[in-house]
Image (cartoon, rainbow, N blue to C red):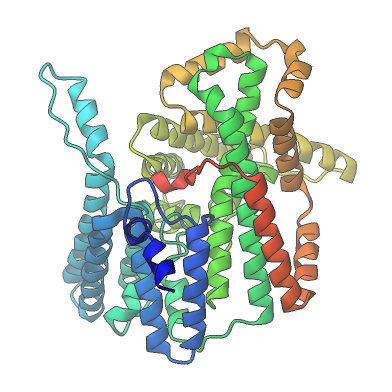
Amino acid sequence: MNNIFNNLDFSKLGEILTYTQNEPLMFNSGLFLFLFTGFLVIYRLVSRYTTSRMIIVIIFSLYFYYKWSGIYLLCLLLIAISDYIIGCKLHKATSFNARKLYVATSVIINIGMLCYFKYTTLIIDTINTFISRPLELWEIALPAGISFFTFRSLSYIIDIYRKKLQPTKNFLDYLFFLSFFPPLIAGPVVRASDMIPQIRRRLEVSKEMFAEGLYLIMCGIFKKSIISDYICINFVDRIFDAPALYTGLENLFGIYGYTLQIYCDFSGYSDMAIGIALLLGFRFPKNFDSPYKSTSITEFWRRWHITLSSWLRDYLYISLGGNRVPLWRNYFNLFITMVIGGLWHGASWLFILWGAWHGLMLVLHKAYRRFFPLREHKPFISRILNTVNILFTFHIVAIGWVFFRADSLTIVKDMVTQIFTQFHPEVLMQFINGYPYVTLAIVSGYILHYTPHELSLSIQRVFEQTPLVLKAVFFAIFIYLVLQVSSSEVVPFIYLQF
């Protein structure tokens, strides 16, 4: 026994368990599965004791975030403390001016912190292009998930201000809500009104919830590790790194590949986050609903990143006046909301262009529907028009993803140039032969995406009805197969940078 302990390298164990830059605790990592299994056992043991259960979750959540951002855990704690105090003061305030002051204070703290960490570099770089003596730029690390937990905290304060929500009874409840680890890093953007009522209720994880959670976790791992990571490493990154080296056909497939990659990557994370929350007894709203089946850009934003798009609608678009203003102002509100949404995604003019592209498309679609309202057609004509609209909307979205993924406007220009001047469709078979598994992954991914939702629900129901032992065996086999098939190179989730 002593020999076993003598052979253990505790220094390496310490490195694994402490914060290490570029080695976060990702859902699809072996370390997370190991730690989460131990956490889940303890969680179930104390499940009848609400406060103990909350403390266990908070400790694990704070550790989870520490593994992502180290010392920047203090940013999360600062937001939790400040907005808990502001929420209590806001609820008690009777003066209109005092209430506005409390909300303004919360906005300044949250958005100020977000702007400092996320946009200082962009601001200084932009200023330096217009002055002869460039300003010195200091290194600023971006705390993981800061865009998500600041938005969650703001929704809490704004809902109290609008008298749609009562503040939490104590700080422990609020810290639980803000730090809860499944959606902490990359969403969904869970609102206080959705989660806080669930915190202190009796823990009940039904067989259906457990099965649904396990099923969503497997779907998320499959999307991320099998489809997204594979086409990213073996094809998409190569195209976007040097599009001028490839034909227009390959560039077009690179765009199609990234369009699938970002969906599988982001919806994969959301599936895992929602699935893990279900295993802990919490139900979150759906974040993706087959967005590439959309027949219009408006419908796309009802299906893509639903929790963010609804947050922008309820807390930004409506605050600007929404559609309760003159028509031109309504279009402006829609456009500027999407521009700000683009800026939220990252400190780059390309993200702003991506947001502006979607804002413009939404305005054009709304104007089109104003002058050409929907009409009824015969079923056959409706199916044809529906298919055409889906294809058109898909390509509108895919064009936007070029701005989202490209590192510079030069990359965008090179891709467009190659597609329109060096297309070379004759290399199609050569491409398929050269990238057989990439082609298979892309085609399979799109087939699965466009498969009727009823089929997925049927598979889920079959999984729910299997005995617990078989579920465990199936999950273990699934994880083993994923480890055998997936790439050895760890690819961070795309939305972790936001």
Name the residue located 60 percent from the left edge and 51 percent from the top edge: 303
Report the side of 299 relative to 77 (left or right): right
As displayed, is residue 468 above or below residue 101?
Answer: below
Which picture quadrant has residue 441? top right
View extreme (front): residue:
3
View extreme (left): residue:
133
As displayed, is residue 475 above or below residue 19?
Answer: below
The x and y percentages for residue 166 are 35, 80
Report the side of 466 relative to 28 (left or right): right
Identify which residue, 453 or 179, lies in the foreground.
179
Residue 396 visible in the displayed image: no
View extreme (bottom): residue:
48
As displayed, is residue 488 above or below residue 455?
Answer: above
Name the residue located 39 percent from the left edge and 79 percent from the top edge: 56
The x and y percentages for residue 260 are 63, 39
Identify which residue, 356 or 170, lies in the foreground.
170
Residue 237 visible in the displayed image: yes
Name the residue located 58 percent from the left edge and 12 percent from the top edge: 418
Report the side of 479 relative to 66 (left or right): right
The x and y percentages for residue 423 are 66, 12
Name the residue located 39 percent from the left edge and 44 percent from the top edge: 497
Identify which residue, 169 or 240, lies in the foreground.
240
Quarter holding the N terminus? bottom left
